[in-house]
Image (cartoon, helix red, strand yellow):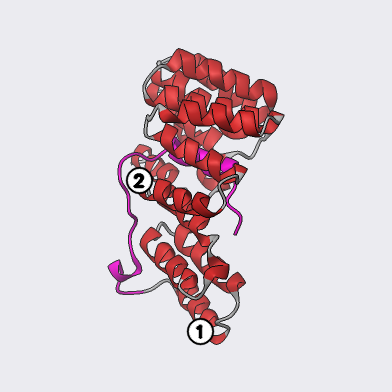
Amino acid sequence: MIVTTVGVLGMGCKNGGNNSGKSEQDSLVENPIIVTMKNQVRKYPDSTRLYDKLIDQYTTNGDYKSALAWCDSLMARGDSNFSYLLVKGKIFRMAQQHDSAINAYQAYLERFPDDEETLLNLANTAAETGNDISLKMTDDIVKKFPSREVKSEAFFIKGVYESRVKNFDRAIAFFDQAILFRYTFYEVYVEKAIAQYDQKKYDASLATLDELLALKSDYPDAFYWKGKVYEALNNKPEAINNYEAAYTLDRSDVDSKKKLDSLQK
């Protein structure tokens, strides 16, 4: 399992607060897909690919506790699975457990202090919590890895920090810089649109999301946030259309489904 910075950066777009996720013990009837996967793991206990699929399925189901438990079971089997600290970091962030994510990334960096991807993920996790140390961290990372892609991610992380502390104009300026360095950095458009939404600049937010959809027409989060904007504008039909599009593209999108069910009552 490869944890990319880009894949992780968009995690805060919908959820807030601490969400440790349901566990498999919370349900008396276990998902039959999970049962099949666990049986395969028991049959082929040396297959990390099967472990990866099981962890991914738990994560998709929002069962973060079980996903983390299976990561721990793999790591307990030997040092060759040390990199699952990165998987744990990603899952902790999805569960909004930022302190635990930071601990996981720091533990990995103790062994690999110059891992570019992990440094960026650590900085972004700090930014998500509104910790201004993320600003210095990104400057240090750019000095060490001065590529266009890293500069783009650094501007994105700074934008995330400014957005979390409600300096929306500064956030948008950083997001625009990130786009200049990499115009296909899709998560930037979403975060920029969210900042504009938080400013109640709904037309600007829609325009940003339409820019994104012109680049990638099947991007679920773009439709979700268009739904949010139209809902704020009291345009119920358009809100429903966009939530429906988001859920059609991503059937695991619980937020869009909840919004859709609420508006269709």
Question: Which part of the image, by quadrant, shows the N terminus?
Answer: bottom right
Q: Is residue 238 shown to the viewer in this render?
A: no
Dot 2 lies on which element?
Answer: helix
Estimate the x, y position of residue 106 in percent, counting from the top left. 45, 48
Q: CA distance from mark 2 to mark 1?
A: 32 Å
Rendered residue at 39%/27% (across/down): 164
Residue 13 magenta-highlighted? yes
- Taking the image as shown, residue 85 lies to the left or right of residue 262, namely right
Check disc 2 and give the amino acid type. Answer: Asp
The residue identified by callout 1 is 42
Estimate the x, y position of residue 30 in percent, counting from the top left. 38, 73
Residue 193 magenta-highlighted? no
Viewer-proximal residue among 81 and 231 = 81
Q: Is residue 74 shown to the viewer in this render?
A: yes
Rendered residue at 52%/39% (across/down): 9
Assess disc 1: are there few (<14), some (14-19) or many (≥20) residues with their C-alpha within 10 Å of its C-alpha. Answer: few
The residue identified by callout 2 is 99
Question: Which part of the image, by quadrant, shows the C terminus?
Answer: top left
- Taking the image as shown, residue 90 lies to the left or right of residue 187, namely left
Q: Which stretch is magenta?
A: 1-29
Dot 1 lies on which element?
Answer: helix
Estimate the x, y position of residue 6 in percent, counting from the top left. 59, 40
Check disc 1 and give the amino acid type. Answer: Arg
